[in-house]
């Protein structure tokens, strides 16, 4: 064993000498320090020498070489300085109490703390602030933080849940700096815009982009929105979208996100046009509430079955299902089976479009409607009245026949829940389907995860409201539902009794 060990030791020695020699040659050729090949404990401390370091003292270009960009840069900064003092951060807190009813008719009262964060913009010297309704909905305490960090308590003046606009007022006698509401009808696709707000609670943030599209819709009730690629994130809701002169042309309301649980900017944001905001603001300041037009008619879209039934060949318009006695539609002469093809000179695209046109009509205004009836086109005139807050069902009331109402809910067999604050912050409205009975009439029509935004063309805002109107409708007729499934809108009909 001893001679063999000597041979192995000799080979290792030869290998080590060869390896060190190669490393020394390579280090020498690269002008390296041969001392670095020695173990650290054998090295002598070296003397640190300063490195030669000559940084540039001139920019790559002179400002005179990029004069146009330089001026644009200065103007962007000037615009930001002018706009930011009027934009506020909003923090809310409160307790929300809701009376709930499940699909078996059982009732329960639930209370839970709520808090939120958003943005707003000052629109009067007295301190009136516009924000989104979903930012302050159900909140008891509203705190405003201004550009300089000063905080105030604000109180509610009025709200428009349908448009998703609220007006609050800062509790102070100071004079504030407002921004002007511009004319959104002059906005063009491609023009530069700036979004200002408080994303993720980080504080004042300005993003720049363009108007990507106009007349976008998130639901049957929220139409004609501006789409922009200016970065809008959670917390931006209620902040202004401004043009190059610092005028408000929109109120940022929602974003498109593929991840509902962790929403973030995807290059698609939506803003409520300033003309709609101005109209709601003026009504709220004068009367404390929004005023909307009322026609008193139940409509349905022109799908292939409806067109075949009526003998109507076109795809544009909305079919009359029924009219309310004494309402403007009935007094104007609208009948079941008519198709409204134009309203006040504007072609009616579908039922949601007609509802939007009616709601925006002034109270007492006479409107001319183009109506198709059994192959003939005629003109009818209706005088618009003020809308009530809910449809009237003369056939049944929710307080009557409690046992029958429970039976109706069981027959339909659908269970829903209210949306969370995070889901509402994405611009969603309505109720979310959580369960469908296999023996109910909703089986095969609805499925868990569906977002029900409307019932019989009436906007749904909560689960209790949904069940109440479902009972009233399903007791006497088929029930139309407006649904979002996987982000795609469609309409469904639950069979009647």
Image (cartoon, rainbow, N blue to C red):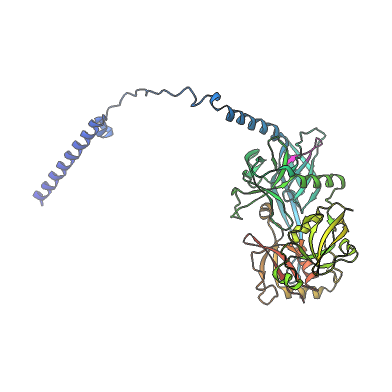
Residue 492 image-quadrant placement: bottom right
Quadrant assignment for the C terminus: bottom right
Q: Is residue 82 left or right of residue 23?
A: right
Q: Is residue 45 left or right of residue 295?
A: left
Residue sitting farthest toward the front: 376
Magenta span of residues: 120-128
Q: Is residue 241 above or below residue 360?
A: above
Q: Nearer the viewer, residue 6 or 382?
A: 382
Residue 457 image-quadrant placement: bottom right
The count of marks equals 0
Where residue 473 appears, as percent x and y from the top left, is 79, 70
Q: In this rendering, does residue 100 appear at all?
A: no
Q: In this rendering, does residue 319 appear at all?
A: yes
Where residue 11 appears, as percent x and y from the top left, is 14, 45
Residue 413 image-quadrant placement: bottom right
Q: Nearer the viewer, residue 401 or 325?
A: 325
Question: Residue 328 lies in magenta, yes or no?
Answer: no
Q: Is residue 99 above or below residue 42?
A: below
Question: Residue 121 lies in magenta, yes or no?
Answer: yes
């Amino acid at each position: 064993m001893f001679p063999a060990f000597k041979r192995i030791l000799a080979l290792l020695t030869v290998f080590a000498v060869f390896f060190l020699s190669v490393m020394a040659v390579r280090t020498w050729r690269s002008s390296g320090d041969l001392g670095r090949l020695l173990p650290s404990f054998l090295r002598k401390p070296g003397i640190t020498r300063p490195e030669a370091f000559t940084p540039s003292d001139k920019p790559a270009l002179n400002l005179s070489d990029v004069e146009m960009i330089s001026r644009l840069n200065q103007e962007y900064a000037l615009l930001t300085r002018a706009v930011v003092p009027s934009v506020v951060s909003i923090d809310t807190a409160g307790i929300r109490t809701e009376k709930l009813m499940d699909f078996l008719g059982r009732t329960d009262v639930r209370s839970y703390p709520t808090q939120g964060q958003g943005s707003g913009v000052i629109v009067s010297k007295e301190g009136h602030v516009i924000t989104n309704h979903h930012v302050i909905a159900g909140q008891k305490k509203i705190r405003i933080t201004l550009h300089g960090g000063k905080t105030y308590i604000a109180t509610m003046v009025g709200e428009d849940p349908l448009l998703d606009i609220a007006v609050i007022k800062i509790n102070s006698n100071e004079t504030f700096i407002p921004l002007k509401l511009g004319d959104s009808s002059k906005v063009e696709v491609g023009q530069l815009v700036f979004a200002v707000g408080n994303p993720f609670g980080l504080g004042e943030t300005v993003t720049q982009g363009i108007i990507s599209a106009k007349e976008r819709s998130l639901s049957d009730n929220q139409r004609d929105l501006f789409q922009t690629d200016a970065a809008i994130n959670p917390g931006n809701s209620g902040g202004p979208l401004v043009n190059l002169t610092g005028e408000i042309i929109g109120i940022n309301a929602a974003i498109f996100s593929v991840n509902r649980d962790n929403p973030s900017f995807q290059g698609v944001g939506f803003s409520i046009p300033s003309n709609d905001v101005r109209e709601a603001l003026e009504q709220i300041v004068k009367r404390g509430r929004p005023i909307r037009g009322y026609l008193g008619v139940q409509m349905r879209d022109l799908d292939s079955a409806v067109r075949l039934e009526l003998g109507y060949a076109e795809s544009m318009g909305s079919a009359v299902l029924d009219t309310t006695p004494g309402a403007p539609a009935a007094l104007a002469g609208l009948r079941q089976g008519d198709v409204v093809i134009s309203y006040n000179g504007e072609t009616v695209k579908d039922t949601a479009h007609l509802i939007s046109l009616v709601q925006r009509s002034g109270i007492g205004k006479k409107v001319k409607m183009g109506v198709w009836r059994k192959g003939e086109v005629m003109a009818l005139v209706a005088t618009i009245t003020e809308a009530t807050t809910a449809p009237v069902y003369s056939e049944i009331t929710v307080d009557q026949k409690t046992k029958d109402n429970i039976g109706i809910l069981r027959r339909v067999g659908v269970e829903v829940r209210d949306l969370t604050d995070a889901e509402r912050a994405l611009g969603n409205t309505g109720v979310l389907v959580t369960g469908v009975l296999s023996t109910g009439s909703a089986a095969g029509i609805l499925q868990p995860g569906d977002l029900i935004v409307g019932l019989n063309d009436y906007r749904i805002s909560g689960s209790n409201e949904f069940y109440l109107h479902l009972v009233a409708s399903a007791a006497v007729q088929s029930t139309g539902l407006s649904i979002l499934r996987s982000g795609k809108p469609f309409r469904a009909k639950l069979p009647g009794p």
